[in-house]
Image (cartoon, rainbow, N blue to C red):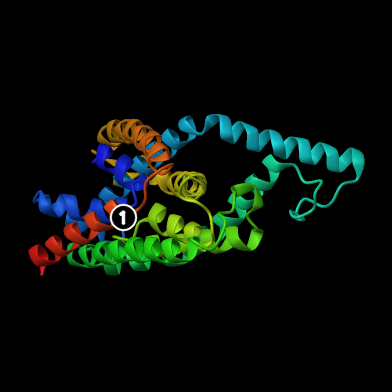
């Protein structure tokens, strides 16, 4: 499950959907039934896997995050000594590029954090079931393929933007699309990449921004719920969670390394086709 989590969180095929479907397909019925409960030991286990995934992303993007944090330090220092623009004014020419990208990532992370606090429990109890996950996985495939089609037809006439030229409104729109990933079967990286492509980023830029956006969201959500692992829900699953988290960290690192190269020349289409085939097959299986 750790290996599956690390790969499917970053591949645009929904880790939450696979977290529902894989145990169901393998006959792990105690895990399947526990996912939609208000208090779930399996949810605690999955939270640990998410923390491992976030650590894998941090290791891969360690130099990028160091540059972004250095940009924040430079911007604060210059704002104090030179009287530069307030930190929330991102479109002025005197804004440090590293700080600006960090601020866009933070801005894009706000909507899903708020929505997650308000809706995560409700949506999990309603939709963390195999048939629902299969339906949403199919929908995810449609989103990927339609997004690619729209980008291809529109992109012929538009020059792709870079992350450096992205507007705060664009970052907020891309970040808001992550809310869809609260439904098991909808991929966080998939919908953010499609939003980025429709916002005129190229595939490489959309992928990098999606992975940067995912890091704080996954890490904060995991750390917020991780104390449950130390309580009664963690009894019997602490060692499996540690092993799974380490596996998720390794597989997430390998996945993001592969995908950052993949999206320099290739598209979302293979992942969309996979989601359609897997989703329809699982609908037939669990209907």
Q: Is residue 94 left or right of residue 107?
A: right
Q: Which is more toward the observer, 236 or 215?
A: 215
Residue at 27% x, 40% y: name it: 235
Residue at 84% x, 39% y: name it: 78
In x, y percent, where is residue 105? Answer: 59, 50
Determine whether 229 is above or below 128 in the image: above
Viewport quadrant of the C terminus:
bottom left
Residue at 37% x, 64% y: name it: 149
Tell me which corner region of the image, top left, top right, bottom left or bottom right, holds residue 181.
bottom left
Q: Is residue 49 left or right of residue 203?
A: left
Tell me which corner region of the image, top left, top right, bottom left or bottom right, holds residue 244.
top left
Residue closest to the far front: 157
Q: Is residue 257 left or right of residue 269?
A: right
Tag 1's secondary structure? Answer: helix
Determine whether 118 is above or below 52 in the image: below
In x, y percent, where is residue 253? Answer: 38, 33
Residue 72 seen in the current view:
yes
């Amino acid at each position: 499950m750790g290996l599956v989590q690390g790969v499917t969180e970053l591949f645009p095929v929904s880790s939450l959907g696979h977290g529902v479907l894989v145990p169901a397909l393998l006959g792990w019925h105690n895990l399947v039934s526990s996912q939609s409960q208000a208090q779930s030991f399996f949810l605690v286990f999955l939270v640990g896997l998410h923390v491992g995934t976030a650590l894998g992303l941090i290791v891969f993007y360690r130099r990028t995050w160091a540059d972004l944090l250095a940009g924040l330090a430079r911007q604060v220092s210059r704002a104090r000594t030179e009287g530069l623009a307030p930190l929330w004014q991102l479109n002025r020419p005197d804004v440090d590029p590293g700080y600006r990208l960090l601020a866009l990532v933070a801005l894009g992370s706000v909507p899903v954090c708020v929505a997650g606090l308000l809706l995560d429990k409700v949506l999990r109890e309603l939709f963390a079931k195999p048939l629902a996950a299969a339906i949403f996985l199919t929908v995810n495939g449609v989103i990927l393929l339609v997004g690619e089609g729209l980008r291809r037809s529109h992109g012929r006439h538009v020059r792709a933007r870079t992350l450096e030229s992205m507007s705060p409104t664009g970052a907020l729109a891309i970040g808001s699309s992550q809310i869809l990933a609260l439904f098991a079967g909808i991929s966080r990286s998939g919908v953010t990449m499609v939003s980025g492509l429709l916002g005129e980023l190229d595939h490489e830029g959309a992928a990098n921004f999606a992975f940067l956006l995912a890091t704080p969201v996954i890490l904060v959500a995991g750390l917020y719920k991780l104390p449950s692992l130390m309580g009664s829900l963690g009894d019997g699953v602490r060692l499996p969670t540690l092993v799974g988290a380490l596996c998720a960290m390794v597989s997430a690192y390998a996945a993001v390394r592969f995908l950052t190269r993949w999206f320099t020349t290739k598209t979302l289409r293979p992942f969309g086709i996979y989601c359609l085939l897997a989703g329809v097959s699982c609908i037939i299986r669990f209907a």
